Amino acid sequence: MMYFSRLKTALVVGACVLGVLLSIPNLIAPPAGWLPWRTIHLGLDLRGGSYLLMEVDMGAVIKERLDGLSDGARRTLDRAGIRPFTLQPQPADNRLLVKLPDASKQDAAIAALRELATSSAQGIGARPDLDFAAVPEGVTITLSPPALVEKANQAVQQSIEIVRRRIDETGVRH
């Protein structure tokens, strides 16, 4: 049988009692406002942890933008009465090719499609997010590089806001 001196036994029991006493504030609500009642606030790392890597899939952003652009171009060309046409997204080149069998309708198609362009900046340096060009097959609508960078930044900011709202719902303190 193992023998422990009374002093060692008293120290072990005392340490256990002290640990229980110090953990009480985390287990129950404070009984009075004047008592020093300090609780330990567990951070996100102690509640389960989280590791985030914010990265934008530019291929998906370009594909989504070209799909929306295709729908808009189809409606715009139908309203303008420019028919027949074929839309061909080209994500590798960041552009949409509008094939027109009649080359004489290129100028009218470009004029009608210009309404799809939006300016991301206001004022003197405002530049549209789409570039239009006439090619032998028809018209190309190219996504401008600054507009793609702006879309990527918007996607990252939106993701950060979503994550922030979800974390704040759990009551985690900063």
Image (cartoon, rainbow, N blue to C red):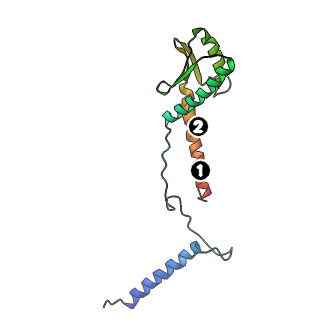
Residue at mark 2? 154
Amino acid type, residue under disc 2 in the picture? Gln
Give how far across and how far down residue 111 sits, in percent.
Answer: 65, 15
Q: Is residue 19 visible?
A: yes
Tell me the tag on residue 164: 1
Q: In this view of the protein, which residue sits in the foreground, 118 or 89?
A: 89
Give how far across and how far down residue 116 sits, in percent.
Answer: 64, 24
Label 2, label 1: how far apart the Cα atoms are: 15 Å
Give how far across and how far down residue 19 sits, in percent.
Answer: 50, 77
Residue visible at 56% across and 64% down in the picture: 41
Residue extending furthest toward the top:
104
Under tag 1, what secondary structure?
A: helix
Q: Is residue 117 visible?
A: no
Give how far across and how far down residue 60 sits, in percent.
Answer: 51, 35
Q: Quadrant of residue 23?
A: bottom right
Q: In this view of the protein, which residue sits in the foreground, 169 or 33?
A: 169
Amino acid type, residue under disc 1 in the picture? Arg
Q: Split into 4 quadrants, where in the image is the N terminus? A: bottom left
* Residue 123 position (above or below residue 103): below
Residue visible at 40% across and 91% down in the picture: 6
Q: Quadrant of residue 12?
A: bottom left
Tell me the tag on residue 49: none
Q: Tell me which numbered mark, 2 or 1, is placed earlier along the sequence.
A: 2
